[in-house]
């Protein structure tokens, strides 16, 4: 009987030990680091040295240029043919103790915002929030082949917090991996010529010219705020707030409440034909540009995280500009035929560094979805001009 009690006590102790181990590192941090030039002999310019640093509980120094204590574990992340590893498709590494970590990162996320998640199979599965946090020295680099004194700088910090690590006063602002240019506002043009005129034979055997379709020109102008907010839900949920009246073409939904801010929505448009409305086309333009453009960073999909056999749930969020407008104008009459916008009002005082316009984000992934959406106005319009810029050029508090 005593043995039975002892065994039961032992089982209970083992259970408590497992619980203790599961909670032992609740303050753990996984830092995704950029560590300089690596040692690929065929591609010496590739910045191949990256690594994951694991800390039981990192303590950040008060100065941005001082090192924290050395990591408890670290592993090098080799590039695959020179590709940057901190991307949505994920980077996987095995720590010296056998723990496997995979980080799914949206690398275009501005500093201070949630950029993705890190998951591990230990303790039946865990998930950490990853924050864009560039520019702090964290440790020596494992790869010393080229540079014996190579150091690692923070790129993304993964933890269990609902906020990024503190930002010291002497830490510079690195809003994105994209470069900021003082050049003029970015503009692009797209022209869709009229469809080819064909002929059809008449009863007399002579061809009769087919009438050329209406060649109206639609000028589309978009503005984007260079400052970002974190929408704590899916992009689909945000777009569903654009409720509009099909008779008037106007938005009729109320303000959207976020975490620490309120978003006001406006839209209006004319009826293009029996099946098409300009309001709907502009809502589609915003929806599609939000899914593709680096101005709108979706949280990366974690494969299998919502399937069976795991006890973690992948959250949804979108890093997006705090304001966006798109206006469609009939170039011949100069009448506005469609308008859509959202703007953010903060609940409290907004603090943080200035955000400058990054024109590199105005690329085909931004313009093409807008072009494709407004092409739905054909044949009323079959020539399109698209222009976009930041407004304001730099946002400061």
Image (cartoon, helix red, strand yellow):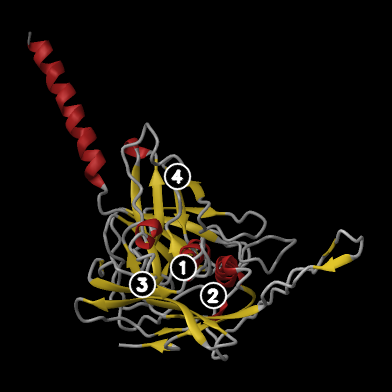
Answer with mark 2 or mark 1, whichever residue precedes in sequence: 1
- The crowding category of the residue bearing disc 4, from other C-alpha atoms within 10 Å (few below 14, some 14 to 19, many at least 20), is few
Q: Is 329 or 295 nearer to us in this picture?
A: 329
Residue depicted at x 31% and y 66%: 164
Q: State which quadrant residue 125 falls in.
A: top left
Tell me the residue that label 3 is attached to: 250
In the image, 95 versus 87, the foreground residue is: 87
Which label sits in the foreground, 4 or 1?
1
Q: CA distance from mark 1 to mark 3?
A: 16 Å
- Please tell me how crowded label 3 is: few (under 14), some (14-19), or many (20+) other residues with Cα within 10 Å: many
**Residue ID for mark 4:** 96
Q: Residue at x 35, y 57 (%)?
A: 237
* Nearest-to-viewer mark from 2 and 3: 3
From the image, which quarter does the C terminus lie in?
Answer: bottom left
**x, y percentage for residue 83?**
62, 59
* Chain-order first, disc 4 or disc 1: 4
């Amino acid at each position: 009987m005593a043995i039975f009690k002892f065994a039961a006590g032992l089982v209970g102790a083992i259970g408590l030990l497992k619980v203790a181990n599961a909670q032992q590192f609740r303050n753990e941090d996984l830092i995704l680091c950029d560590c300089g030039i690596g040692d690929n002999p065929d591609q010496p310019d590739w910045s191949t040295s990256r690594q994951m640093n694991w800390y039981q509980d990192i303590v950040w120094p008060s100065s941005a240029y001082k090192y924290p204590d050395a990591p408890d574990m670290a592993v090098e992340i080799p590039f695959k043919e020179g590709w940057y590893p901190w991307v949505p498709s994920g980077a996987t590494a095995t720590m010296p103790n056998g723990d496997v970590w995979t980080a799914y990162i949206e690398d275009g996320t501005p500093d201070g915002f949630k950029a993705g998640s890190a998951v591990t199979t230990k303790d039946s599965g865990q998930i950490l929030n990853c924050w864009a946090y560039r520019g702090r020295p964290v440790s020596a680099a494992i790869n010393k082949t080229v540079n014996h004194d190579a150091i690692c700088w923070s790129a993304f910090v993964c933890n269990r917090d609902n906020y990024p690590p503190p930002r010291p006063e002497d830490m510079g602002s690195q809003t994105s991996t994209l470069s900021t240019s003082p050049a003029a506002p970015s503009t692009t043009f797209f022209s869709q010529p009229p469809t080819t005129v064909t002929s059809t034979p008449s009863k007399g055997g002579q061809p009769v010219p087919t009438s050329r379709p209406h060649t109206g020109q639609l000028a589309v102008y978009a503005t984007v705020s260079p400052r970002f907010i974190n929408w704590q839900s899916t992009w689909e949920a945000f777009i569903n707030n654009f409720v509009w009246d099909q008779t008037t073409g106007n938005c009729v939904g109320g303000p959207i409440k976020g975490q620490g801010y309120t978003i006001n929505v406006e839209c209006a448009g004319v009826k293009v034909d029996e099946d098409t409305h300009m309001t709907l086309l502009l809502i589609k333009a915003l929806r599609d540009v939000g899914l593709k453009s680096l101005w709108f960073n979706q949280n990366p999909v974690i494969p299998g995280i919502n399937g069976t056999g795991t006890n973690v749930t992948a959250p949804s969020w979108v890093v997006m500009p705090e304001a966006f407008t798109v206006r469609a104008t009939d170039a011949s009459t100069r009448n506005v035929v469609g308008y859509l916008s959202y703007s953010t009002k903060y609940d409290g005082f907004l603090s943080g560094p200035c955000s400058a316009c990054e024109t590199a984000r105005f690329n085909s992934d931004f313009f093409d979805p807008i072009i494709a959406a407004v092409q739905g106005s054909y044949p009323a319009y079959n020539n399109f001009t698209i222009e976009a810029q930041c407004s304001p050029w730099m946002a400061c508090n």
